[in-house]
Image: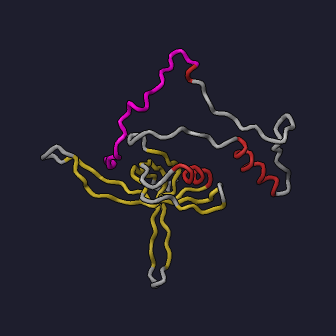
Amino acid sequence: MFDSATLTICGNVVADPRVTGLGDNPDRVSFRVIANRRRRDPQTGQWVSAGEYGMNVVCWRKLARGVAQCIHKGDPVLVIGRMSERQYTGSDGQVHWHTEVTADFVGPDLSQGIAGRFTRFTQLDRLSERDLAVGEAGTGSADLTGSDGANEAEEPTDEIDFAASDDFVPADVDAFEVSEPEPAVF
């Protein structure tokens, strides 16, 4: 798109994300990220704070669902998205602008620590998003019985037996030093 700027933000979530939507399927999730700018002082060679900035981030649909379940206050995150602005008139009659990033991708900043195991949305979730919408439109219905006619759909497994590989060496998680997150370097 020519009408939007793509941004990459590396910072910390300052409050638990706000969820808008029903139950386990939020439509919209928003949160605020604060990033610390740092630079190297040419005289001392030390890294010094050069200020900080905050950005509101909004996520939609599937990304909103994943963020609502995985991202929490204090987490170091990496956000890639498009800058957008909204104009509104406040109760004081003045025109105000609200700038935010509409996220395309959100993930943990793995330079700051170790994330938990990744879990995919189940195939049943993907099926329900696509086929139940068709069923609601009256043009069909979703078949949740599976190919063998059972009453329950099978949940796919994403488990991989890495130990079965001859060259697999499990990581010693305790060997990694996990400390307080350092401010983002720009």
- In percent of width and height, residue 46 lies at 19, 45
- In percent of width and height, residue 42 lies at 16, 46
Q: Of all residues shown, which one is farthest toward the left?
A: 43
Image quadrant in which you'd find residue 178? top left
Does residue 104 appear anywhere in the picture?
yes
Q: Of all residues shown, which one is farthest toward the top?
A: 166
Q: Of all residues shown, which one is farthest toward the front?
A: 174
Image check: 131 left or right of 36?
right
Which residue shows up at 56% across the image and 54% down it? 68
Q: Is residue 49 magenta?
A: no
Q: How many marks?
A: 0
Image check: 86 left or right of 52?
right
Image coloring type: secondary structure
Q: Main secondary structure of the magenta part?
A: loop
- In percent of width and height, residue 64 lies at 58, 54
Image check: 155 left or right of 115?
right
Image check: 131 left or right of 109?
right
Q: Which residues are magenta?
A: 164-186
Q: Nearer the viewer, residue 22 or 107?
A: 22
Which residue shows up at 39% across the image and 51% down it? 11
Which residue shows up at 51% across the image and 48% down it? 105
- In percent of width and height, residue 50 lies at 25, 55
Which residue shows up at 48% across the image and 83% down it? 91
Does residue 3 appear anywhere in the picture?
no
126 up-or-down from 170: above or below: below
Q: Nearer the viewer, residue 128 or 154?
A: 154
Q: Is residue 165 magenta?
A: yes
Q: Nearer the viewer, residue 132 or 82?
A: 132
Q: Nearer the viewer, residue 37 or 3?
A: 37
